[in-house]
Every structure is written in structure tokens, then in C-alpha cells.
Image: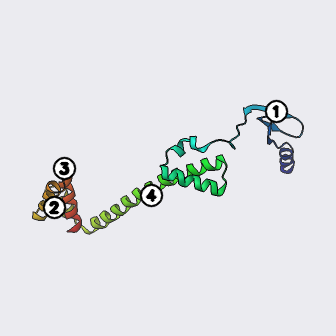
Amino acid sequence: MKVKIVASVLSATLVLSSIGGSYALANSSHMISTGVKYTSYENADITNHDLYKRLTKDKQKEFMEIVKGTNLNYQQQVQLLKDRENMGQEQEKTLKVSLIKKAAKILAAKLGEKSIADIADYLFDWEDNLQQGIENYLVDKAGWNTTVAHWTAKTIMFILF
């Protein structure tokens, strides 16, 4: 039974072909036009594409050298530009995620070493001269906001001691 179903499906397989500038679906008995116009990309100019225009002049020149050296058609050129853009986004995300993971691992390791009293001191009112010195340096010399400097100094002291 399954073999007959597969055989009947295979015998009526539709083939996509280009006829008279439009796509047509064809089986062994008749042709059905879909009415969708076929667009030839062979002569399209990649320099008009948005992804190409976003490249710097140096990158555009480099891209054109690659295209000329490999004889890529328009669709392959567009795919190459898309892959390049996706690669940049993936690398940026990966870098941010890896930095956050490393910081979280360091903090988790330090939290494992600290007692509840140390954590409470960190969160509420523990200060000493070294922490105040770091905070003053960040505000006066580095130009940081006082709140950011305060919590950065507290975090540094918490991690180091």
C-alpha cells in the first residue's frame, strides 16, 4: 500500500521550469502557469544593493576584488554580503556573552568564598579607607558619577578582600 502511494506521488512529481519569462509548474500531462514573473539577476549591479552600500570604501573595493576573482553571480554576491553581515553580528554577540559569563563566574567564585556577613557588609554599610580612596579616585581623576564610583569601589573591595 505504502509503495503504491509513493509511486503515485513520484509519478506526479512537479517540476519547476522557466517558460516564456514566467515560472510554470509542469507534470507529465499538462502545464500550469503561476503568473509569477522571472527576474534575471545575471546583469544586476551589486553596487546598488543596500548591503553593499553599507560597506566602507575599502571593504567595497575588497569585495569587488573577491567577486572578480571568483566570478560570482548576483545571487551569490548578495549571499556573501548577507553572510558577512550576519558574521559580524554573531561575533559581537559572542564577545558580549563571553565577557558576561566570565564576570559571572568570577563573581560566583567570590560569592562562594564569602560569608553572609561579608555579603551583608558589601550591600549595606561596610567602608574603609581603601574603598574610599578608590571611590575618590574614580570620581576626581576618572570623572565617574559618584553612584557608579561608589558601587564600583564596593565591588572591587568585595572581590579582592
Q: Are marks 1 and 4 in contact (CB under 8 Å)?
A: no
CA gap between label 3 and label 1 equals: 70 Å
Task: State the image coordinates of residue 157 (x, y, percent, origin top left).
Answer: 19, 64
Q: For this rendering, which residue is in front, 159 or 121?
A: 159
Where residue 32 sits: x, y (%)? 82, 33
In the image, taking residue 1 as reference, residue 155 lies left or right, namely: left
Q: Give me the residue at 51% from left, 54% from top.
A: 87
* Residue that carries the numbered disc 2 in the rendered image: 134
Task: Describe the element under mark 1 as helix, strand or loop.
Answer: strand
Secondary structure at badge 3 equals loop
Q: Which residue is mark 1?
A: 32
Q: Which circle marks residue 137 in the picture? A: none
The reply, left or right, for residue 77 in relation to residue 60 is: right
Which residue of the protein is positioned furthest toward the right in this rendering? 29
Q: Could you tell me which residue is drawn at 50 percent across and 53 percent down?
A: 59
N-terminal of the pair, mark 2 or mark 4, is 4
SS class of the residue under badge 2? helix
Give the amino acid at mark 3: Asn
Considering only order in the chain, which callout, 2 or 1, is on the residue closer to the N terminus? 1
Residue at mark 3: 145
Q: Amino acid at mark 2?
A: Ile
Task: Find residue 79 and report its horizontal and vertical position in percent.
Answer: 60, 49
Relative horizontal placement of residue 44, taking residue 1 as reference (left or right): left
Residue labelled with disc 4? 94
**Vertical placement of 100 versus 30: above or below?**
below
- Measure the alpha-carbon separation of dots 1 and 4: 48 Å
Quadrant the C terminus occupies: bottom left
